Amino acid sequence: MGQAGCKGLCLSLFDYKTEKYVIAKNKKVGLLYRLLQAFILLYLVVWVFLIKKGYQDVDTSLQSAVITKVKGVAFTNTSDLGQRIWDVADYVIPAQGENVFFVVTNLIVTPNQRQDVCAENEGIPDGVCSKDSDCHPGEAVTAGNGVKTGRCLRRDNSARGTCEIFAWCPLETSSRPEEPFLKEAEDFTIFIKNHIRFPKFNFSNRVLLQGAVSAQVGEGPSDSWPGPGTSSLTSLLGRPWPSPRSNVIDVKDRSFLKSCHFGPKNHYCPIFRLGSVIRWAGSDFQDIALEGGVIGINIEWNCDLDKAASECHPHYSFSRLDNKLSKSVSSGYNFRFARYYRDAAGVEFRTLMKAYGIRFDVMVNGKAGKFSIIPTIINVGSGVALMGAGAFFCDLVLIYLIKKREFYRDKKYEEVRGLEDSAQEAEDEASGLGLSEQLTSGPGLLGVPEQQELQEPPEAKRGSSSQKGNGSVCPQLLEPRRSGHLQNAQVNLEQLQTVET
């Protein structure tokens, strides 16, 4: 039995099993199935392949470098600084062009500060005192401007005053600006150059942001496009794009970068007017220039490398990153810096400047896609799996929701008894046949005398078995059936013993 079992197991490895399909002639369920197939096919073709380009391998590890330059001149005439010209070296921080730069638009100037003793500002809680013992010598004023000397200075014999400190005196004024200091900053220009590379496909594109060699020159700026309140804009509206390895050095006309401005009629100039950038970000220049703010310039590169390299175009959007609606004490953007000098006696003094302005963050991101057989197969397989989900849904409708669900359920599912159940059934049948044998071996069957039964000719006995409703059973016909059932029961018992061993 063991060898036979191993042989049967080995032979079963070469068996092929196939599914049995039941065709349901139901028009409603059939129509639902076809609609689901059409929807899944439409989703696969339109959304997955045409819109999302599911047949492409994608590289999102963009390598980027940004170079920026700001140009412009402003003139001011104040009581603290007098007449002064402000150029790029004065109002751009840091001086070297990076992806983050700051343009000064407003200033609070405190000139001629020297290291000396003076009274702390009244608005500093840690500097308030009523007697000298409140001012510990050598202790720095928390959130203040200097170190306490140990004296409490009171005005007009008032009960409370402020501690005397050793600091840069006179102290900075705490007043807030009322109007922009550099109003001409709205006409400053920003030059942006961007280098990118997708390492997965070894694709590089050293192109100026929106800068084409064939750009039109001499187009002036326009503030009406895309207009106030518009936070994004796209470029490259049907115009030719240069080779991906061209840059500003390839421009033959030297006056190109000195005369062009980006605008609705000139999408290829890399020079942006500062006021227009603020307006495209949905803000007003006069408001943001007063207390400062943060503007984000987002450059998006979505390159389809199945097309020509010249079709890799940048798109960008402008947005204000700080909370422009908040009017708290911390709103805006500012910082302090100083310029140091020495007088004729060699004593150092400085001019302190609290600068308000606009910080620009240039952020670059993107992706590149190229055909690959692996994502194509994966997405096609996903579509085929969705087809199976549609069939599963229709099965649920067919066997659980419609009126004739029990009929279709009986046709779809077929009950098959196991080997143990078959052996038990055979044993029960054998015991029943044993009882029938005892009945047929007695003096009569179902009230029929034995002598009368034996005297009947074989023809009559065979004929009587074909009659219906006479209530008699022929023992000669019952004998072969009984022996056959006993033989089947014996075989089933042997198979059950084989399975158990």
Image (tube, rainbow, N blue to C red):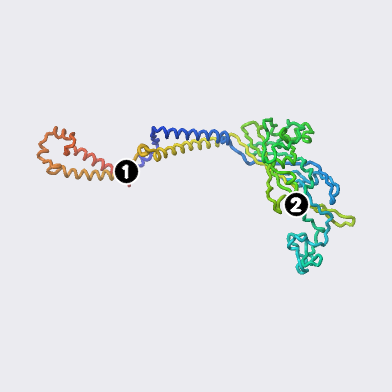
Query: Hey, what amino acid is under mark 2?
Result: Phe
On residue 69, the disc is none
Residue 449: x and y, percent?
11, 41
- In percent of the image, x 76 and y 32: which residue is there? 217
- Secondary structure, mark 2, is strand
Q: Please tell me which of labels 1 and 2 falls first in the chain.
A: 2
- 243 vs 117, left or right, is left
Residue 125: x and y, percent?
73, 62
- Secondary structure, mark 1, is helix
- 372 vs 162, left or right, is left
- 420 vs 289, left or right, is left
Q: Quadrant of residue 148?
A: bottom right
Q: Which residue is mark 1?
A: 419
Q: Quadrant of residue 343?
A: bottom right
Q: Which residue is mark 2?
A: 335
Residue at mark 1 to residue at mark 2: CA–CA distance? 88 Å
Q: Pick the residue in front: 130 or 49.
A: 130
Query: Hey, what amino acid is under mark 1?
Result: Leu
Q: Quadrant of the N terminus?
A: top left
